[in-house]
Image: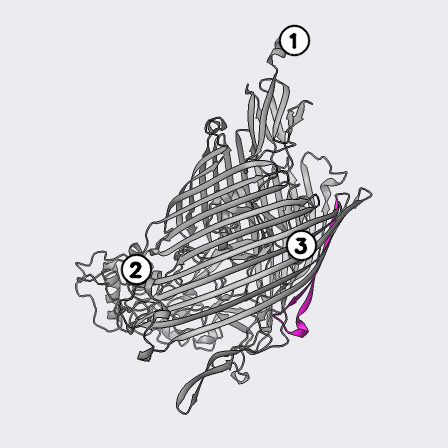
Amino acid sequence: MGHFLMAQSTTVTGTVLDSETQEPLPGVNVVIKNSNTGTTTDFDGKFVLANVNENDVLVFSYISFVTKEVRYTGQTNLAINLQPDVAALDEVVVIGYGTQVKKEITGAVAVVGSETIEELNPTRIEQALQGQVAGVNITAESGSPGSGSNIRIRGISTNGDNRPLILVDGNVIEDLSVLNPGDIESINVLKDATAGIYGVRAANGVVLITTKTGSKNSPLKFSYDAYGGFQQTSRKIPVLNATEYALLVNEAFAAGGSAIPFTDLSNLGTGTDWQNEVFQNAPIFNHNLTVNGGSEKSRYSFGASLLTQDGIVGGSKANFKRYTTRLNYDTDLLENLKLTTNLIYTGTERKTLSENGIGSVLFNALNNAPTFAVRDANGAFTLAEGLGNEVINPLAQIENSFNSTDVDRISGKIGLAYDFWDNLSANSSIQFNYAEVQGRFFTPTIFYGAGKVFNNTGRNTLTVNKDIFKDYTWDNYITYSNTFNQDHKVQFTLGSSVFVTKGQFSGGTQGFFESPVNFAEADIANAVDLQNGLKDSGLSGKFDERLLSYFTRVQYDYKGKYLFSGVLRRDGSTKFGPENRFGYFPSGSLGWIVSEENFLANNAFVNFLKFRGSYGILGNDRIPGNAFRSILNGEGAYVFDGQLVFGQAVGVLSNPEIQWEEQKTLDIGVDLRLLDSRVDITADYFKKTTEGLLLQPQVSGILGASAPGAQAPVVNGGTVENSGFEFAIGYSPVRQEDFSIDLNYNVTFLNNEVTEVNNEAGFLQGGSFGIGQDPPARMKAGKPIGYFYGLETDGIFQNVDEVSAHATQPNAAPGDIRFVDQNNDGIIDANDRVDIGNPIPDATMGFNLSINYKQFDFGAYAFASVGNDIVRNYERNQPLVNKSVYAIDRWVGEGTSNTTPRLTTGATSNTLFSDYFVEDGSFVRLQNAQVGYTFPQAFMDRFGADKLRLYVSANNIFTFTEYRGYDPSASSGSPIGAGIDQGFYPVPRTFLLGVNLNF
C-alpha cells in the first residue's frame, strides 16, 4: 500500500503571473492545502513543488493579490494567474506627496483599479467613476462625442467652480479628455481632510490618477486592446404625428377665435418624424497599444491610442478623434538616486453642432411641425414658417453647421528621488502642461425662414480663435520615516510647491461676400471685404497666475493599532490682494485598528475593523484672476463729435478684501472586513461647511455695475453646508479556482443647504426658462443651492365658477392651470413664487456584479439617482410647434383633465414657470454589461501569446425613469441652473465587440 501511495506523488512545476500585466511574480507562497509542504516562486515567477498527489489543492498567496486555490489533476506544468486585490489591506495607496498602506489610512480615500476601467470601456475617465465610488456623482455635460463631464465629490460646495483638483502622476490636469483610459493604472479619490495636503485647491476633493508603468527585470511585453461598435439614441420623446398635430392645432385656433389652418386632414398621415431624421446609428472605434518592460535598474511603459467617434446626431458633423501617446520611464541612476520621467501627448479634433439650448438641433427636431417635409418639391430644405423665431429645419441646420476645435497638448514630468539613508529621502520634480486650442466656426449665407434669428443672409462669416495655455509645477519635499522601540512608527514630510499658469487667447471674425465659400478654404488672412466697409471684430487677452505653497505632514503609528496624521499647508495665491494673499490650512485625522487588539485578534468572524475620523480646513480659489483689482476692458463705447468711438472701460469692479473660500470638513468612518474578508464594508458620516463663498451679488448700478461691460465685484458672501452618509459593501460569496462571484453596492445620502447669502436681495438667481421670463433657479438661505423658484399649481380650472372664486389670475379661463395664492392677497403674481423643486438628488447608488466561470467572465454595472427634480424646458410653447403626446390628454371640458391645460392661441398664464414643468428626475440606469471569453493558456502557448480575450459589451443599456425628456441626468453643470433640460443631447447607447491580446 505504501508503495502504491508513493507512486501517486509527483513533482509539479509552474509559473505565477500577474493576471493584468502578465509579468512574473517572485516570492509567491505555494502550499499544499492542509499540509506543511510548500515553496515560493523564484525571480522569474517559477516554482517547483515535490510530493504532490492527485486531487491535492495548491494554495497560491501573495501580498496585495487574491489568494487562489487550484486542484491538481495530473498536470506537470501549471500556469497560474493571480488577480490583484484592489481592496487588499496591504495595498499601497497614493495620498499626495507620498503613499500609505491602505489599512493605515485614517481618511476617506477610495480606489478604482485598472481592471474596473477596462471592463467599463469608457471614452472618458470620469465615466469609470460613476457608481463605483460612494460620494462621487458624475453628470455628463452632453452625450455628444468629446463632451465633458461634471465631477462632484460629496455635493455642491459653492455656487462657482465645483471641480475637484485632478493630478495625473502628480501633474495638475484640468481636462481629463487628454487621457486615454487604457493608460490608467489606478484612480484614488480623496474625499475628506486627507486632501488637506493640497490646501487652497482641495475644497472640492482631489482625484489622483496613476498611469501604468513597467516592472524591473521583466521581458518586453505587448498588450493590444481594441473595440468597435455602434451607438444609438437611448431614448426618443413621443410627440404628435401629423394628423394628431393638425387636430390639436385646429382645436387651439378655434378656441382662440381664429380660422383653423388645416381644413383637410385626410391625407396627412403620420408626416415627418424629425427625431428619426436627426438620430442615426453612429460608429465608434478604439485602439490601444501598451508596451512594458524593465531591466535590473530601469522600467518603462509606452502607450499609444486612437479613438474615433461619430455623433448620433449629425454623424460626421459631430465627430470626435483623439490621439494619445504616453511614455513612462524610471531608472536607478545610482544605488540611492532614482530618475522618474513621463510624457503624454494628446491631440483631439472635435466637430460640434448646436446643442442643449433653445435653437439647438434636438430642440428644433422636437418642435418642428410633422406636417412639413424635410425638403420641398425643388429639393431645397423646407422652411419652418409660423413656428416662432427660434425653430428651424434641423436637417438644414446640420448641413450648414461647420464648427471645429482642435487641441494639441503635451504633459510631462521629470523627478529625482535621493535616499540619504534608509530613513531619509528627498524628492524634487517638475511637471508641465502646454496646450494649443484652435477653433474655426463658419456660418454660410443661409435663410431658414422669415424672422428667424439664425438667418445669415448678408455674407458668410468665419470666426477663428487660438488659445495657448501653459503651466508648470515645481515640487520639493523630504520624507523621514523611522520606527522606535518596535512600537512607534513615525513619518514626517516637509516640502514646498510652486505653481505657475499662463495663457493667452486671440480671436477674430470676418465676413465674406463671395458665396458659396468652402469651409476648409475660408481664411481671415485672405479676406477681401475691408474695402467694402465691413467691420471686423477681434479679441485678445492673457493671464498669469501663481501659487506658492509650503506643507508638512506627520504620520504616527503605535503598535499598528493607533494612528494619527496631521497636515499643515500655507498657500499664497496671486488671485488675492497683498493683504489677503496667504492662508493656512490645517487638518488632522485619527484611526484605531480594533482588530489588532488582543480581544479581537485572529477572530474568525471579524478579520479587520478600523474606526477613523478626520477634521480639516480646506480652501477654494477657483475664481477669475484679478478680482481684487479693477481691469480695463476694450468694450467701452462713447460718442465724440457724432462718431461712435471704442475705448477702455472698467470691467469687473474691484474688491481688495476678497479672500479664498474656506471649507471646514468633518468625517467619521469605519472600515470592516468579515468572514475571511469575503465581506468588505465601509461607512462614513460627513459634514462640509463652506464659508465665504466667492460670488458676484446683485448690486446697485450707482456703484458702477450698470456701466457698459461692467460687472459686480466678487465678494465673500455666502455659506453652504453639505452633510450626508456613505455606505459601501462588497461581498464575495464564491471564491473557487473556476468559479467566483463578487457583488458590490454603495449608497450616498446627501443634504445640501445654503445658510447665508450676504447681499441686498438675500438671494442669487440663475438658469433660464422659456423666453423673457425670470431665471428659474435660486440660491437662498434655508434652501438647497440652485432650487427651483416658481408658481405652485393646484390643478386645472374646470368651470367659470372656479375661476370666479379663485384669486385674480391674468387671462384665466376654464381649462387653464390654477396657481396657488401663497400670500393670500387675492392676486396671482410674482410674489406667489415658492420653492417648487430641487435638482440635487437625495441619494445616489451604485451596483456592481462580477462573475467568473472557467474561461468566461460577466460583469454588470448600474447606477441610481433618487429625489432629484428636473425642469422640462425643451418645448417652445407656441401654437404651431409640435407637442409631446401627453397633450392628447389635455382639458377639453369639465372633468376631462386636472393635469394638462387646454390648447388655445389666446393669451393665458399657462406658460409661466411653475411646477407644471418640474418633473421627478429619479432614475435607475443599467450602465454596462459585458461578457468575455479568455482562451486557455495551452491554446495560447501554440502562438507564443500570453492572453487572448474576446468580449461583447453594451453601455447605457436602459434607464428606468418617469421623466419624459431624453435623459434624467441632464445638467448644465452650473450650481444655479442645473437640472434644466433644454433639449439635452442624450448619452448614447453603445454596443461593442472587443479584444484583449497580451504577448
Residue that badge 1 annotates: 2
The residue labelled by disc 2 is 888
Q: Residues within 10 Å of mark 2 (few under 14, many from 20)?
A: some
Where residue 166 appears, as percent x and y from the top left, is 57, 56
Question: Residue at point 64% right, 74% down?
Answer: 577
Q: Does residue 146 show up magenta in the picture?
A: no
Mark 2 or 3: in front is: 3
Residue 131: assigned label: none
Residue lying furthest bottom? 641
Q: Which residues are magenta?
A: 561-588
- Give the residue type at disc 3: Ser
Main secondary-structure element of the magenta-colored stretch = strand
**Amino acid type of the residue that numbered disc 1 sits on in the rendered structure:** Gly
Give residue 428's mark: 3
- Under circle 1, the secondary element is helix
Q: Quick check: is 578 in the magenta stretch?
A: yes
Q: Is residue 808 left or right of residue 496?
A: left
Residue 681 visible to an observer of this rendering:
yes
